[in-house]
Every structure is written in C-alpha cells, then in structure tokens.
Image (cartoon, rainbow, N blue to C red):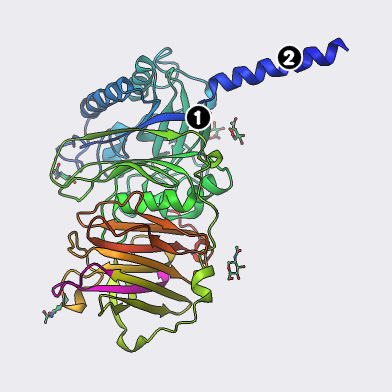
Amino acid sequence: MELPKTCASAVLLVLSALGACAMDTYVAAVYEHNVVLSEDTEVPVSSEEALMLMEKNIAILEAAVKEAARQGANIIVTPEDGIYGWVFTRETIYPYLEDIPDPQVDWIPCVHPGRFAPSPVLERLSCLARSNSIYVVANMGDKKPCNSSDPRCPSDGHYQYNTNVVFDSEGKLVARYHKYNLFVTEKQFNYPKDPGFVTFNTSFGYFGIFTCADILYHDPAVVLASRFQVDTILFPTAWVNTLPLLSAVQFHSAWAMGMGVNFLSANTHNSTLDMTGSGIYAPDGPKAYYYSTEMDNGHLLVTELSSRPRLSPDYPAAVNWTLYASQTKQLPSNKHAFSGVIYHDLFSFTELTESEGNCAICQPDLCCHLSYKMVEKQQDEVYVLGAFDGLHVVEGEYYLQICTLLKCPSTNLSTCGQPVEMAQTKFEMFSLSGTFGTSYVFPEVLYSGVQLAPGEFEVLTDGRLRSRAPTSKPVLSVTLFGRWYEKDPPHTHQASP
Ligand SMILES: *[C@@H]1O[C@H](CO)[C@@H](O)[C@H](O)[C@H]1NC(C)=O
Ligand SMILES: *[C@@H]1O[C@H](CO)[C@@H](O)[C@H](O)[C@H]1NC(C)=O
Ligand SMILES: *[C@@H]1O[C@H](CO)[C@@H](O)[C@H](O)[C@H]1NC(C)=O
Ligand SMILES: *[C@@H]1O[C@H](CO)[C@@H](O)[C@H](O)[C@H]1NC(C)=O
Ligand SMILES: *[C@@H]1O[C@H](CO)[C@@H](O)[C@H](O)[C@H]1NC(C)=O
C-alpha cells in the first residue's frame, strides 16, 4: 500500500512544480526599427566595415531590449534585415554573414565565444538576451559551405540564407530558421531545400517562427499554426505596405485571427519605402499595434498576452467560411458590375449607390454578399463591393479568393482598387460573407488613416464578418482575404548562380 501513495505524492510534486513554472500570461515586445543602412550596398566592404555597420544597429536594438526588459517583457522580436539593411548582391552581403550552428549543439555564445567559427553578431545577441534575462529574436545572414558532392551547391561554394535566430533568457541559441519563401528581390540569398518547421517550448507557451513573405504561403506558416498548434508565431519582417488589402498591420492582424494564434510582428521602418506597421496580435484581435508615416525613429510595443490562447474561454470557435453565403438566395444583379485592378488582380466591382442595402458580386466560383448601412452617404465618396477568384502572379504566385468592401480614391470609378489612406464615411453596420472554396480566410477591417478596429467587429461561425456597433472611424476597407493553398503552383526554387 506504500508504493501507490509515494507515487501519487511524487506525481503531485511534479505537477505542482510544473504549475509553478508554467505561466498563464506573458509579456511580449516587438520593436519597429529604422535600420542604419550602408552607404552603398553594391560595392563589397571588408568584414570589419560590415561589423561596424551591424554594431550601429545592434546598439539601437540593445536600447530597445533593455527598455522591453525593464517593462517586464519575456520576449522581444526585432525586424527582418534589422541588423544590416537590404538591396545587396550575393557578393556584397557576404561579409555580413556568420556560420550559424544548429541549435542542437547547445551553445551560449556569450559564455563560450569562439566555440565555433567567428560569430561576433551571435555573441552580441546572446549577451543581450543573457544580461537582460529576456528571449531575443533577430534576423541575420547564415552561410553554409558546400561542394560539388552536392548538385545544388552554388558555384561560389556556399549557401547564403536569410535567417532568424532566437536566444533564450540565458543567451542560449534555441532556434534557427532559414526563410523559405524569399521575396523576388532577395537575389543575395538561397532557398533552403525544404521548408523548416522551427519550434521551441518555453514556460510561457509553444512558439513557431517564420519571416515576411512566408506569411502568404502554406509552408511553413500554416503548418506551424494548424498541425503543430503553436501558441505564438514570431515574425520578423521588412514589409512594404500595399493598400488596399496588404498593409502590414491589416494583413498580419487578420492572419492571427484567421489562424487562431498569437502573432508578434516586428517591421522595419522606412518612410521612403512605405515600410511601417508592427503589432502584437491575439486570435481575438490586436492587443497593440504601431503605424506611423510621420516619425522616422524606432518604436517599441510591449503588452501582455495569453500563453496558451487555445485554452482560453475567449478562444474563437471554428468558422465555416461558406455557410451563410451559400444559403443566401439573393442573386447578384451584375448589370452595374465593372472591372478594376487591386495589386495586379482583376476584380469585379459593384458600386454601393444607396446609403444602405444588400448587394452581391460574383467571379467564377466565388459570390460575395454584403449588407450595410452608412451613417451618411457622402456625395464625394464612392464605395464598392468587389470579388476576386484566381491566381495572383506578380511578385509570387498564389491563389486568392477575396470579398472586399472598399473606398475608391475618387468618384471616378476607374480608380477603384487603387490605394487610398483616408475616408469620411462611417458605417452604422456591415456584414460581409462569401461562398469560399477554402477554409483559410483572413478577416480584415481597416479604418481611415490605416488604423485597425480592435473589438469593433466579429466573425460569426457561419462565416459572416460583421460590425458589433457603428464604426468609431470612417472605413477604408472590410475584407475576407481567402487563400486557396491547394490551387497554388509548386514552390519554386531559385536557380543557383
Ligand atoms: C564535400 O562534402 C562532403 C559532404 O559534406 C564531405 O564529406 C567532403 O569532405 C567535402 N569535400 C571537400 C573537398 O570539402
Ligand atoms: C512543446 O510543447 C508542445 C505542446 O505543448 C508539444 O506538442 C511539443 O512536442 C513540445 N516540443 C518539444 C520540443 O518539447
Ligand atoms: C529608406 O531606404 C532607402 C534605401 O533603400 C534609403 O535610400 C532611404 O534614405 C531610406 N529612408 C529613410 C527615411 O530612412
Ligand atoms: C460548411 O457549410 C457548407 C454549406 O452548408 C457545407 O456544405 C460544408 O460541409 C460545411 N463545411 C464544414 C467544414 O463543416
Ligand atoms: C478616371 O481615372 C482613370 C484611371 O486613373 C483615368 O485614366 C481617367 O482619365 C479618369 N477619368 C476622368 C474623367 O477623370
């Protein structure tokens, strides 16, 4: 009789120890960084010069890490390209790269510098994490020697990867992720052979990581959220805002809601290139975000999040994205339909001519339905309902199904779909739905001034994106952004140089 009792108390002991360590909530930080750029990224520099530039950026990131730690943050995410900038060639990025070992080597660079190849940047980042007792997420370049025994090996004898690294609060390297979906302009880097599904556990949840354009594709992004069921995604990015549907805060917050994960997005800041928009997003809406085209300094966001959002009573229920629209009898009167282009895709539009009503618009297999009521119809402002069902082919190939209510830049209907940042019309209510063929739909609501609408809208389990109350600001767009991954062409690999 003695044995079971001992076992039971041992189990209790272990459970209570785990209970003491596991945190229900944690404090997350993201830093939007105005990167100090090299004078000329077309001319090769020495590794000393490269390090001097990287030190300038790390000094700025260090101040953000210290401030985040002072505010109690457990983890901080810094942006893609945040240590050396962008627009390099394969040759000119080389002096900035370090050979980053697999985290399985169990290495604290701050404590054992020089255990591997020279790694001044890894050492600095590791020490930042260790001396401030905070997880640090950064983006840098990895180089990996290869030779002719590998048919993919580039002719200069090494791979170059756009890489995220994560250090735990003791400075140990715990994650290394090579960006799988490079943007078309990133000629300085190689595609990894296969997508990496990089995860790690902490006392404040299960984490996954990917980078920038990865968010548009299935691997590894969707797999981390839906198969691995991570709690939080870490997302360094250098995102150029592309209104009306793909500005950073708008799309990243919508992805977090659509996939049901926490999402920590750190963007670079460059007003010339329209790069701004960082945030801390939860499955039920944005917790903190930043968007500024006026300031030219960095910006730190710090806020509390649930460690295990899937266990929270507020966790959104599963949505059938087609249920409501597929039962709607109302047929579209396409006689006033016209075409317009959003970011190279040919949408079908119909104008909202009245101050309230129901309307619909279809493209081959997608019908979009809208019920709406404006507070007041402005004479000098035009809104349309739009639908797109097709393969997007510019700067990446991916299949889209989109229903969108949006403001046109002018009363000239030919401008509908072009970017616009300001509006005057508030809505009493809106309810948008579509007959989606995919179950991956990201709900976006964007207000005048590229502002989000936390708490002001909801997604019903029948697939309606609906206002909860009259909008507090004028509306730029309300969108169901669907991605039909099964219809994407196969992942393309960059040819070796
Ligand atoms: C080439 O790569 C193979 C496999 O990594 C390795 O075993 C071999 O030693 C390398 N050869 C040279 C000349 O580096
Ligand atoms: C981390 O935790 C998740 C679930 O909480 C589990 O599925 C996964 O196997 C764990 N991973 C590791 C590496 O311990
Ligand atoms: C933005 O980046 C470009 C280089 O791509 C640079 O020329 C420009 O000065 C930067 N703008 C600001 C405001 O920092
Ligand atoms: C969603 O609703 C549609 C229409 O009623 C139905 O055909 C479909 O099976 C449902 N999908 C799921 C995943 O339940
Ligand atoms: C309407 O806008 C289109 C596209 O911007 C432009 O080409 C056209 O000239 C405009 N028409 C008028 C009447 O302003």
Report the magenta residues as a range: 374-392
Q: Secondary structure at mark 2?
A: helix
The mark that comes first in sequence, 1 or 2, is: 2
Query: Could you tell me residue 478's position as x and y percent?
Result: 33, 63
Q: Is residue 57 left or right of residue 199?
A: left
The residue pinned by badge 1 equals 24
**What amino acid is labelled 2 in the image?**
Ser
Q: Residues within 10 Å of mark 2 (few under 14, many from 20)?
A: few
Instruction: Tell me: residue 153, above or below residue 22.
Output: below
Q: Residue furthest right?
A: 1
Q: Does the segment drawn in magenta span residue 333?
A: no
Callout 1: SS: loop
Q: Is residue 455 above or below residue 338?
A: above
Q: Position of residue 364 (x, y in %)?
A: 45, 80
The residue at the point 33 percent across, 65 percent down is: 429
Which label belongs to residue 430?
Answer: none
Q: Which residue is mark 2?
A: 9
Q: Is residue 407 above or below residue 20?
A: below
Q: CA distance from mark 1 to mark 2?
A: 24 Å
